[in-house]
Amino acid sequence: MEKMTLQVNDLCTSFFTDKGEIKAVNHVSFDVPKRSIIGIVGESGCGKSMTARSVMRLLKYPGKIVSGSIAIEDKELTALTEAEMSNVRGEEISMIFQEPMTSLNPVMKVGKQVQEVVLLHRKVTKQEAKKEVIRIFEKVGISEPEKRYECYPHELSGGLRQRVMIAMAMICRPKLLIADEPTTALDVTVEAQILELMKNLRDEIGTSIILISHNLGVVAELCDYVHVMYAGRIVEQAETFELFDNPKHPYTIGLMNAVDSLEKKQGVLDTIPGTVPNLLDLPEGCSFEPRCGKRCEKCVECVPELHEIAPGHLVRCHACGQEV
């Protein structure tokens, strides 16, 4: 049986506002096998980042994990106190945010910021911690690491700042790395370097990775498994080759068609009609039903279950038995 680094089971995260409950993460379940990279894809607002923040327990008020389980190996994260969770962050689970300039302290040298992580989780001297920081800077491809150690964030390029964030995330050799749109603000050359770096760190250190992205090309290149989210729910999940070769959910097919039409440079870009539903007022049945060309009466009446249509290939769709 394949060993898992992370197991998320029936996770529900909501934001309780004056207007009502916003179900940002709605009964989400997935596993992250050891030494694997899984991708979570979908439109903005579908729940990708909220799922990641729930795993890290970095939800701001009025956000709250309502129910479900989040386990890293045999440790249940939802049962930990905030002090216990602080020890887990950085040491067992790390996260790279999509804009490093807002994640790094602008008035503190980057080397010192990474050094703080080492001093927090390891019993070492400041000098030993500095040597470890310079070593990880070299590992992630930061040239002149001693010089960069003394730089402030604004003195570094976007690519170098992102490498600093990766160094900070990886320095304690975590079991799980969550990368939330890690290459969004970077040009394509730097993007390729960062993705290759993440893959190498997985191979060398054995860290499992959750990659959150809207870029299907990046996901296809890097990930072993893909989970497609829509309106807070996972609507399809499979191994990467299976999902890209044989997408079944109408939403997944719509995403694929949009990419294909862009790559083929057709005159008209394929789009998915309609808009993402308001999470305060979700349809009673399938959340994608108002935008779906394959909808039927059953889609209006009840939410489809996520069920297996082939080994390891799960779809949340009433029409999945048909050619969708």
Image (spheres, rainbow, N blue to C red):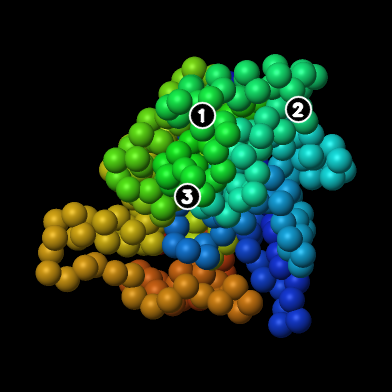
x, y (%) of residue 21?
71, 73
Taking 15 as reference, is 205 left or right?
left
Which residue in the protein does label 3 denote? 181
Element at label 3: loop
Q: Is residue 67 visible?
A: yes
Q: CA distance from mark 2 to mark 1?
A: 21 Å
Q: Residue furthest toward the bottom?
A: 19
Mark 3 Cα shell of 10 Å, populated few (<14), some (14-19), many (≥20): some
Comes first in the chain, label 3 or label 2: 2
Where residue 147 is drawn, which disc sits there?
1
Q: Nearer the viewer, residue 133 or 16?
A: 133
User: In the rendered image of this protein, does residue 7 appear above or below residue 213?
Assistant: above
Circles 2, 1 touching at the beta carbon (< 8 Å): no
Residue 235 vertical position relative to residue 295 in the rendered view, above or below: above
> Which image quarter: residue 67?
bottom right
Separation of marks 3 and 1 at Cα, in angstroms: 28 Å
Q: Which residue is mark 2?
A: 119
Which of the two discs, 2 and 1, sits closer to the camera? 1
**Which of label 3 and label 2 is nearer to you?**
2
Quarter location, residue 226: top left
Check disc 3 and give the amino acid type: Glu
Q: Can residue 208 be seen from the camera position used here? A: no
The quadrant where residue 272 appears: bottom left
Percent position of residue 80, x then y: 84, 41
Q: Is 78 left, or right, of 244 in this rendering?
A: right
For marks 3 and 2, give the CA distance.
Answer: 28 Å
Q: Disc 3 or disc 1, which is closer to the eye?
A: 1
